[in-house]
Image (cartoon, coloured by chain):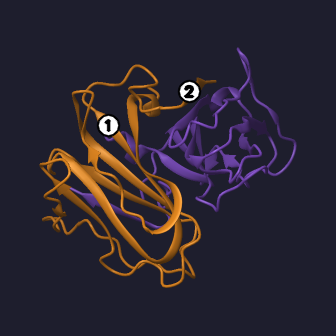
């Protein structure tokens, strides 16, 4: 089994111009894609160059698309991470059991007030669906996909 | 099995804006363990005017770190290592995937990518190792990891 052919990548925040003292625009993640439920979601926050800490980096959930989002609370409290001003080029990851969560996830991502701010990209990898995605588009590769064998 | 915790993520191009968007090299041996498969992802933001022309977005490999990289040839089943044209008008915010059987390529991989004008992009690879990583660090999580 090649795991990544059984997963779906979903963009949350595409690479964007550097942001300072503001929140990134994030797209919600629907754990149901093309009618197929994914049991796990791994949300990756990928930092580029930054000169300031991320002041808010947390996951919210809702049963309704576009509204009603509340903080995800795990056994250790609100699901949040705290990238600092020296965490350039690092990955921060939330692995989420979607069987215990509401259908939609949203990432709250706010950059503090620095000299120039930070580059950040975020995406989710959905896994453990009942039916595996069988095409590039269903795997989330909406630009293109190559198989090198 | 939670597949994403059995994989290792590797940074190859931090989120940035520019025209020179080639990746750093990807070593398919991490912490002494060989990866049999690699999924290399490029996520584009706003693509600059002129896009990325044919032949300027491709995968290369080498047996030697830092030198000797050559294009991945088209294989017997018709697949190869080069993407088609990326246009500025229609390809903003798209995700490009290269799924590589690294048992059949050389040890080091890299993506060469040159845009005609400043383009926002990032790149990373997800490796499937012979032995599953069992810590955040060996999963490539250089910042922090939370299991919910």
For label 2, the residue is: B145
Relative side of A105 to B11, left or right: right
Q: Residue A61 lies in what quarter of the image?
A: top right
Q: Can residue A129 be seen by looking at this rendering? A: no
Q: In the figure, B101 relative to A57: above or below? A: below
Residue projecting furthest to the bottom: B50
Instruction: Say which element carries label 2.
Output: strand
Residue lying at 72% horizontally and 47% vertically, measured from the top left:
A114
Name the residue located 54 percent from the left edge and 42 percent from the top edge.
A88
- Give the x, y percent position of residue A32: 64, 46
Residue highlighted by disc 1:
B128
Q: Is residue A81 above or below residue B44?
A: above
Image quadrant where residue B111 sits: bottom left
In the figure, the shade used to draw chain B is orange
Numbered label attached to residue B12: none
Q: Which chain is purple?
A: A
Crowdedness near tag 1: few (<14), some (14–19) or many (≥20) residues, C-alpha within 10 Å: many
Secondary structure at badge 1 equals strand
Q: In this view, does B54 lie to the left or right of B62?
A: right
Q: Which of marks 2 and 1 is nearer the N terminus?
A: 1
């Amino acid at each position: 089994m090649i795991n990544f052919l059984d997963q779906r990548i979903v963009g949350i925040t595409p690479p964007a111009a550097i942001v300072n003292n503001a929140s990134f625009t994030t797209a919600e993640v629907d754990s149901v894609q093309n009618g197929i439920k994914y049991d796990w979601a791994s949300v990756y926050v990928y930092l580029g160059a930054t000169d300031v800490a991320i002041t808010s980096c947390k996951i919210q959930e809702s049963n309704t698309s576009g509204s009603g989002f509340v903080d995800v609370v795990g056994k250790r409290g609100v699901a949040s991470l705290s990238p600092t001003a020296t965490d350039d080029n690092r990955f921060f990851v939330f692995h989420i059991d979607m069987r215990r969560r509401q259908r939609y996830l949203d990432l709250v991502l706010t950059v503090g007030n620095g000299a120039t701010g930070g580059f950040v990209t975020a995406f989710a990898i959905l896994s453990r669906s009942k039916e595996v995605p069988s095409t590039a588009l269903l795997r989330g590769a909406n630009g293109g996909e190559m198989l090198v064998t | 099995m939670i597949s994403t915790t059995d994989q290792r993520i590797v940074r190859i191009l931090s989120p940035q804006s520019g025209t020179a968007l080639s990746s750093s090299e990807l070593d398919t041996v991490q912490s002494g363990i060989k990866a049999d498969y690699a999924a290399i992802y490029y996520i584009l933001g706003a693509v600059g005017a002129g896009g990325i022309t044919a032949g300027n977005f491709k995968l290369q490999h080498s047996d030697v770190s830092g030198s000797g990289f050559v294009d991945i040839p088209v294989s017997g089943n018709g697949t190869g290592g080069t993407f088609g044209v990326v246009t500025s008008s229609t390809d903003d915010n798209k995700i490009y995937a290269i799924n590589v059987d690294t048992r059949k390529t050389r040890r080091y991989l890299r993506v060469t990518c040159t845009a005609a004008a400043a383009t926002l992009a990032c790149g990373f690879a997800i490796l499937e190792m012979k032995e599953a990583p069992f810590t955040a660090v060996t999963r490539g999580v250089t910042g922090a990891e939370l299991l919910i």
